[in-house]
Structures are given as C-alpha cells and as structure tokens.
Image (tube, rainbow, N blue to C red):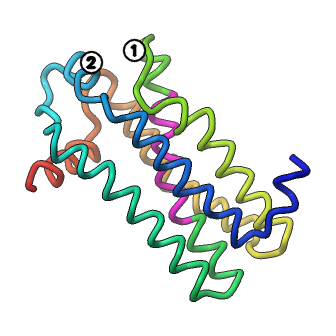
Amino acid sequence: MKRLDKIPFNKLIWLIPIVYLLHELEEWYIFEWWSNVFPDSAPLPEFAGRVWLLASSAFGFILIGLFSYFMNPKTVAISSLILASLPFANGLQHLYWLFYFSTYTPGVIFASFIGIPVTIYIAWRAISENLIKKRFILLLLIFPIYIFHEVIMAGDQVPNSMKILIEFISSF
C-alpha cells in the first residue's frame, strides 16, 4: 500500500482504464455464458460485442488522458470518480451474479475483486488529498446502487439497463 501512496493522484487514476481494459478482456468470452444463464434474452452479438469491449476501453483511456491533461486536480478527481462509478456498478453486478448463478461470471475477477478495491482506494486518496468531499462519494453511489438494485430485482432475467445496452451494441 505504501507504494501506491507514493503515486501522484493524476497518475493513479490511470488504474481506472487499465483495470477496466483487463475486465473487458476477461469478458471476451462472455457470450456463451450469457446465452446459458439468460436463454430467453436477445443474443449478444459477438463481433459487435467485442468491438464494444475494446471501444469502451479505449474511450476510458482517452477520457482519463483528457482529464489529467486539461483539468485542475479537483476536477480530475471528480471526473475520474464519475467515470469509475460505471465499472464499480459493473463489479457489483458481476459479484451478485457470481453468487446468484453459483458459477464463474466472465469479468468478475477484474471488475469485482480488483476493480472495486481500486475504485475505493482512488476515492479514499481523493478524499485524503482534499480533492473531493466525503458527501460527493454519496452522490457517486446513487448510480451503482440503482444498477445493483435493478440486477437484484431482475433475478434470472436480463436487467433493463443491459437490454438497452445490448440493443445499442446490436445496432452496429
């Protein structure tokens, strides 16, 4: 932990897209898992899905690059943590599915076991360096809690937000 503490915040935030990319690569073979656990859902388009995995990862790197280059430290912290709330929500979803379906969920290792702690650490660093206030974290939790609630309520069905995302990806 002491090594991480020495990394400047504007460099530490690069862990967000790095962990997200590793998560997306872990999801590279999610399509078969998806059709097994959600047999009644629209199929995930493999090619478009893989393009999405790579494009969303590249977008994360671009955003972090823009944040760290053009913004002041407080704005960097706020913007980066808003961005990190998306994979944080996804990590909660993967963790829930791991227990709900009692099987490995492609993406769970990097989203849940690595991504969630990394996001919490970055948030802690932002608070301890006075870049954000603690109450900002409460605002950030609204989205992940909403998504997590939606996943729980969906049970063994595809959550509505995922249906929208699949429809968007399928349009390519």
Task: Tell me: 114 left or right of 32.
Answer: right
What secondary structure is marked by label 1?
loop
**Label 2 or label 1, whichever comes before in sequence order:** 2
Extreme-left residue of the structure: 171
Q: Is residue 94 above or below residue 161?
A: above
In front: 39, or 20?
20
For the residues bearing labels 2 and 1, Cβ distance under 8 angstroms: yes
Q: Position of residue 8 (x, y in %)?
A: 79, 69
**Circle 2 SS class:** helix
Residue occupying image coordinates x 47% and y 65%: 61
Determine if the magenta segment contains residue 143: no
Kind of residue at badge 1: Phe
Residue numbers of the magenta segment: 82-95
Q: Which residue is mark 2?
A: 37
Residue 157 to residue 75: above or below: above
Residue at left 91%, top 50%?
2
Residue 156, quarter of the rendered image: top left
